[in-house]
């Protein structure tokens, strides 16, 4: 599952090695990318369909009512597709929980009976934006609810790449690695008006990733409309589906490894030249500017 | 606030292994859509729903062209907004909202005059409904053109039926309508009693441009005041 510590560079541990044998990158921050959403999700095993307000309040008060002044109900609808001899059958299951959010709703923690989600669009670096808040809320949540068994860990980054010169989709063929650029490199490149692809990867026996990426036209505002601009969206979802007893240190390490894997995958989608243009700086020297610390 | 997530495909009978690997779908990590930028929300929704998009002309045309467009300010803008959301002709819109074409051209000729309420038909209620539906639907035009009942409802100007069909679609596809920031529609004050205070404070009410309150005095029925009068009426 994890490479031995003798294989890892000095100053890091085995959890800094990306899954799937992917090439690890140095700990850097990319100062010119825009993270639309960074999400860490932990699903537990639980029979309950509702998280009582009293339990959620305990977590909220300990987590910080001043930093997260918004406390409101949140619902989740789970859709399960079951394959039967008669054909696929779809069932829905609703879970009722609570949402804690900062006053501008840029960062939110969703507490459901069997799920904890930390989501932010004010991403600065992994440790401060996701790692520490997740560790803290997990500790409080498990203590308050008594859940003990983790079912799934997931980390998702929705990255929006925008360049002012991207007036056609074909612009991105030089910025995306050829296997991901697909038809943007082909004979119909100049005819392409939009691209979307989804790639599912098996990184380990219990770990995988889903990469959704593609070009979309930025909506035009104003009359007369300015020339079109095409953005590139990279939606990275790295996860581990493995029943594991909750352990604070182990969970933190596993999510950290997902984070390192996500960065390695991000570098797999982008060309080397474009990655260099995104102004990577060592995490130790990085300011608090928006960027990555993966 | 609601969020929607898909669980992994369940295969108790082991049938999935008989299908190609591409049939399997992984369960993505949950994203709270309400916290996302509108554009990204729309793009992700269209990507997620591509498998459900109808075949044909409208299959690859998510309503991105109306994403981010502000609520129309004038009746002319409203007509064109409906045209663009559903990708229909202006004539279809005129018929659906009960606005004669010549009235529309009059609005264009005299943009500074305020249209009479009676000439607006069902225009603003229809805009209000579709403004919210397009925000919550990954491809409202695709859905409309593949749903004959929705086309009938629109042509008949039956807004309630249109909303009902959308709810049925949502239920059938396991999508939480509220997951995509769809507040309840507000159709303004349909009657001829207008509270001027409300009309000023509510943007929707002012856009609805409800009829003016009739101020002319009504004639009262006169009762006979004397036996002579009563006899005369008999």
Image (tube, helix red, strand yellow):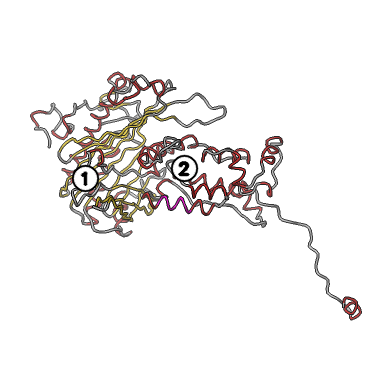
Parent chain of label 2: B
Q: Is residue B47 above or below residue B197?
A: above
Of pointers 1 and 2, the one earlier in the residue sequence: 1
Q: Is residue A149 magenta?
A: no
Residue lying farthest to the front in this orientation = A86
Q: Left of B38 or right of it: where is B122? A: right
- Label 1 sits on a secondary structure element that is helix
Task: Where is residue A97? Give x, y as percent.
Answer: 33, 54
Q: How many marks?
A: 2
Residue at mark 1 shares a chain with residue at mark 2: yes
Quick one: SS at disc 2?
helix
Main SS of residues in magenta: helix
Left or right of A278 on screen, residue A2? left
Q: Which residues are magenta?
A: B164-170
Query: Which residue is at a point 10% across and 28% down the rendered structure image?
Result: A7
What percent of the width, then of the height, locates residue A153? 22, 43
* Label disc, if present, on residue B16 of the rendered structure: 1
Q: Chain of mark 1?
A: B
Near mark 1 (Cα within 10 A), the count class, few <14, some 14-19 or many ≥20, is some
Question: A94 above or below A264?
Answer: below
Q: Which residue is mark 2?
A: B140
Q: Are marks 1 and 2 in contact (CB under 8 Å)?
A: no
Q: Nearer the viewer, residue A14 or B165?
A: B165
């Amino acid at each position: 599952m994890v490479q031995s510590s003798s294989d890892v560079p000095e100053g890091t541990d085995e959890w800094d090695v990306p899954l799937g044998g992917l090439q690890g990158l140095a700990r850097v921050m990319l100062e010119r990318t825009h993270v639309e959403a960074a999400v860490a999700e932990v699903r537990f095993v639980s029979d309950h369909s509702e998280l009582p307000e009293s339990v959620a309040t305990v977590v909220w008060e300990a987590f910080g009512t001043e930093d997260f002044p918004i406390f409101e109900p949140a619902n989740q609808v789970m859709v399960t597709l079951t394959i039967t001899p008669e054909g696929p059958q779809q069932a829905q299951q609703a879970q009722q929980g609570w949402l804690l959010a900062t006053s501008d709703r840029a960062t939110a923690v969703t507490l459901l009976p069997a799920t904890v989600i930390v989501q932010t669009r004010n991403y600065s670096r992994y440790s401060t934006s996701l790692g520490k808040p997740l560790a803290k809320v997990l500790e409080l949540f498990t203590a308050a609810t008594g859940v003990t068994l983790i079912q799934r860990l997931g980390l998702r980054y929705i990255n929006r790449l925008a360049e002012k010169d991207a007036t056609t989709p074909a612009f991105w063929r030089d910025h995306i690695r050829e296997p991901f650029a697909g038809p943007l490199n082909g004979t119909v490149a100049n005819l392409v008006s939009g691209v979307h692809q989804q790639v599912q990867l098996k990184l380990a026996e219990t770990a995988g990733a889903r990469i959704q990426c593609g070009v979309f036209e930025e909506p035009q505002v104003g009359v007369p409309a300015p020339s079109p601009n095409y953005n590139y969206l990279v939606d990275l979802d790295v996860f581990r589906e493995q029943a594991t007893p909750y352990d604070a240190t182990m969970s933190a390490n596993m999510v950290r490894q997902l984070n390192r894997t996500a960065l390695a995958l991000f570098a797999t989608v982008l060309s080397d030249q474009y990655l260099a243009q995104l102004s990577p700086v060592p995490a130790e020297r990085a300011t608090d500017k928006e960027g990555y610390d993966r | 606030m609601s969020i929607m997530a898909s669980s992994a495909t369940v295969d108790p009978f082991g049938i999935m292994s008989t299908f190609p690997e591409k049939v399997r779908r992984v369960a993505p990590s949950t994203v709270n859509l309400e916290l996302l930028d509108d554009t990204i929300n729309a793009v992700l929704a269209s990507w997620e729903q591509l498998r459900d998009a109808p075949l044909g002309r409208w299959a690859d045309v998510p309503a991105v062209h109306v994403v981010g467009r502000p609520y129309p300010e004038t009746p002319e803008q409203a007509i064109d907004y409906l045209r663009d959301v559903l990708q229909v002709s202006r004539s279809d819109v005129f018929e659906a909202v009960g606005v004669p074409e010549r009235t529309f051209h009059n609005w264009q000729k005299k943009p500074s005059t305020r249209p009479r309420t009676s000439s607006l038909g069902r225009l603003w209620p229809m805009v209000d409904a579709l403004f919210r539906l397009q925000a919550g639907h990954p491809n409202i035009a695709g859905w409309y053109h593949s749903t004959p009942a929705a086309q009938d409802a629109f042509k008949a100007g039956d807004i309630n039926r249109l909303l009902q069909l959308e709810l049925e679609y949502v239920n059938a596809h396991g999508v939480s309508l509220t997951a995509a920031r769809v507040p309840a529609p507000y159709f303004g004050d349909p009657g001829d009693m207008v509270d001027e205070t409300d009309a000023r404070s509510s943007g929707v009410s002012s856009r609805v441009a409800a009829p003016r309150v009739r101020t002319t005095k009504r004639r009262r029925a006169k009762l006979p005041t004397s036996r002579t009068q009563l006899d005369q009426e008999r």
